[in-house]
Amino acid sequence: MSDAANARIFLSHAGEDAFEASLLRFAVEPILAPLGATVWTYRRDQPRDEHNVAGSLKARVRQSDAVVFLLSPSTLETSGTQWMELADADAFDKPVFILLHRLGFADLTARSQGVPPLVLASQCNDAALDWRAVIDAVGKRLQPGADAGG
C-alpha cells in the first residue's frame, strides 16, 4: 500500500448496480476507517466534465491500493468497462477482491464464455458472496506490513 494512513479502494461495478455500489461504499468506509479508507465510485467521484473517462478510470485504478470488483449478471451482460478495469488492475498489479452479487460461483463456471480467466483464477468462489468477509479480507491486505503478494 502506498500510504498506510490513506487506503484507496476502487469499487468497480456495472452501471445497473450503482445503487448497490453506493450502499457498499457507505458500509465499507466506516469498517475500514482505521486505515483511513476511501472508496472511489464512478457516480460519486468521477468528474462530470472529464472528457477522457477511460483514461480517468485507468488512472484511478493505478492510484488505488485495492480493487473491489462487484460482479453481477449486469457485469456479464453489459459491462465491458468493468472488464477493462479488471485488466488495468492486473496490469498495475493491484489486489482484486471479487464480490459476487445476485449470482454464485457455479453460475460463473457454468458459462462457456464471457468470464475472464482473471475472475475464475482469483479468490472468487462461493465465499465471494459474503460482502463482509470480502471487505475484511481487503482490510487485512491493506494493513501496514501485510504481505504484498497476489
Image (tube, rainbow, N blue to C red):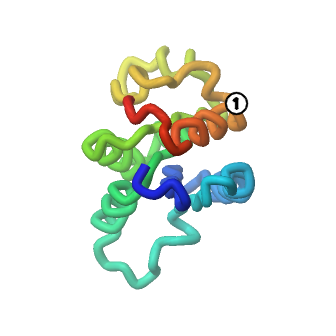
Mark 1, secondary structure of its residue = loop
Residue at 53% across / 61% down in the picture?
6
Residue plotted at (60% across, 33% down)? 137
Q: Nearer the viewer, residue 142 or 107?
A: 142
The number of callouts visible is 1
Mark 1, other Cα within 10 Å: few <14 / some 14–19 / many ≥20: few
Residue displayed at 42% across by 22% down: 120
Query: In the picture provided, is 92 more to the left or to the right than 74?
Result: left
Q: Position of residue 125 (x, y in %)?
A: 56, 20
Can residue 73 be seen here? The reply is no
Asked if residue 26 lies left or right of residue 121, the reply is: right
Please tell me whether residue 22 is drawn above or below residue 98 in the rendered image. below
Residue wearing tag 1: 130
Residue 66 seen in this snapshot: yes
Q: Nearer the viewer, residue 7 or 58?
A: 7
Give above or below for 92 relative to 109.
Answer: below
Depth check, front residue: 125 or 141: 141
Q: x, y percentage for residue 93?
A: 31, 41
Residue type of the residue flagged with mark 1: Asp
Q: Residue furthest front?
A: 145
Residue 140, by quadrant, is top right
Farthest-out residue, bottom: 49
x and y, in percent, of residue 81 in the image: 38, 52
The image shows residue 59 at horizontal and vertical percentages of: 32, 63
> Is 85 left, or right, of 12 in this rendering?
left
Asked whether, in this view, residue 35 is left or right of residue 78, the answer is right
Of the 4 image quadrants, the one containing the C terminus is top left
